[in-house]
Amino acid sequence: MEKKLRKPILVGTIFYTILILYFLFFAFNRLDNRLDYSEYGYEFMLVPEAVPLSFPRLAFSWLYDLGNIAAFIPFGILIPLLYRVSFRKFISLFVLSILFLETIQTLTYLGSFDVDDVISNTLGATIGFIAYKVGFSSKISYKKLIASALSIGVLLVGVIVISETFNYVVAKREGPIQALHDVKEMNGTMPMTENLPSFTVAGKKIEPKMNVYNSEGDKSKSYTYILGNKKDVIFYSYYGIPDKGDFKGEVTILVDGNIRVQRNEEYDNGAEPLNIPFFDKANEITIIVCGNAKLWDVGFSEIKHWWE
C-alpha cells in the first residue's frame, strides 16, 4: 500500500472502530436498559442457539442479524491493508478482541455475552479478509474492486444457505402438544378429562377436547404438576368465564412459586388463548382456579433438537 494512503486509511479505521464501539456499548438504549440486565445478573450464553443469518425478510431482527455480520466486514479489509498479517493471526486476534468486548458488555450490564454474536462478527471479519485477498492484496484495479464486492455478496449468500441448512438439520423445533394432566401431579386434584361438558363464553359455544380446569363456585381449587426442570416449554390453554352463572372468577398460573399469568373477570376477553413460553427451567407448575372461571385444553409442548 502506498504511504500516502496509509494515513487516511488509519484515520478511517480509528473512526470506524469508535462507531462500532458506540453501537456495542451505547446504542439501542443500552444505558436505559442497564437496570433490566442487572436484575437478572450476568448473562453468558455459551451454546449457539440461532443461525447467524436467515433468508431475507422485512423485520428488524433480520436487519440486526445482517448488521452483526456486515458491520465487521471492513475490519477484514482495513487491518490487512494497514499491517501485513496472515489470516490465522488476524482471525485469532479478532476473536480474542470480540470475546473481550462481549465480556465487558456483560460485566457492565450493557448487554449479554452471546456466542452467536461472536460467530456472526467473526464471519463478517472472515468475509472481509477474503474480499481483501481478492481485490486489495496486490495492485488495485476496478476489476478487482468489482470482484471483491461480488465475493462479499456471494459469501453472504453462502452464509444464508449454510445457516438455513443448519437451522433445518440441527435447530430446535417445537414438539407436539401434550396434556398437562399426563405429567406427575402432586396434590391429588385432577381436572375433568372424560365426558367434557360444553358451555358458552361470550356467546360462543365451547367444546373442550382435552381437559377442563374449574372450581366449585366460590371455592378455590389448586392443581400442581412436576415438569422435571424442563427448558424451552410453551404452555397452552384457553381461559374464560361461562355465560351462565355469576360473571366472577380468577385463574392464576405459577411456575416454581412465581406468578406468570393472572386473569379474572376484569380482564375477560371471551375465550382467550393463553400461550406462554417458559424458556428458563420450569419444574413445578401450579394452576389455581376460583369462582366460575375455567381453563380448558390445557397442555404444553417442548422445543427440542431432533435427536432429543
Image (tube, helix red, strand yellow):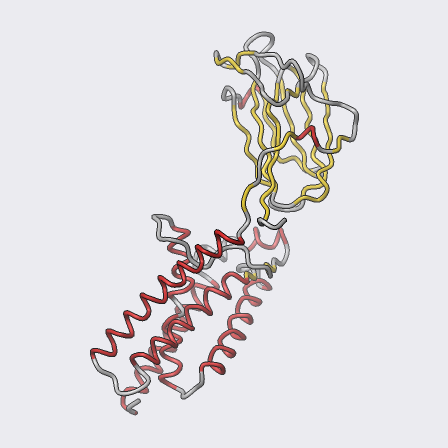
Outermost residue, bottom side: 3
In which quadrant of the rendered view does residue 48 lie? Answer: bottom right
Q: Is residue 225 rendered to the left or right of residue 49?
A: right
Q: Identify the residue at horizontal 72%, vertical 16% (top origin).
A: 219
Spot occupied by residue 7 in the image (x, y as percentages of width and height): 32, 86
Q: Identify the residue at horizontal 29%, vertical 79% (top origin).
A: 135
The residue closer to the viewer here, 239 or 21, is 239
Q: In this view, does 55 lie above or below 136?
A: above
In which quadrant of the rendered view does residue 247 lie? Answer: top right
Q: Identify the residue at horizontal 42%, vertical 57% (top origin).
A: 53
Q: Is residue 35 rendered to the left or right of residue 222?
A: left
Q: Is residue 222 rendered to the left or right of residue 67?
A: right
The residue closer to the viewer here, 24 or 283, is 283
Spot occupied by residue 63 in the image (x, y as percentages of width and height): 37, 55
Outermost residue, left side: 142
Spot occupied by residue 206 in the image (x, y as percentages of width and height): 53, 15
The N terminus sits in image quarter:
bottom left
Q: In this view, does 57 lie above or below 5?
A: above
The residue closer to the viewer here, 143 or 8, is 143
In which quadrant of the rendered view does residue 13 lie? Answer: bottom left
Q: Identify the residue at horizontal 60%, vertical 64% (top origin).
A: 107
Q: Is residue 2 above or below residue 292?
A: below
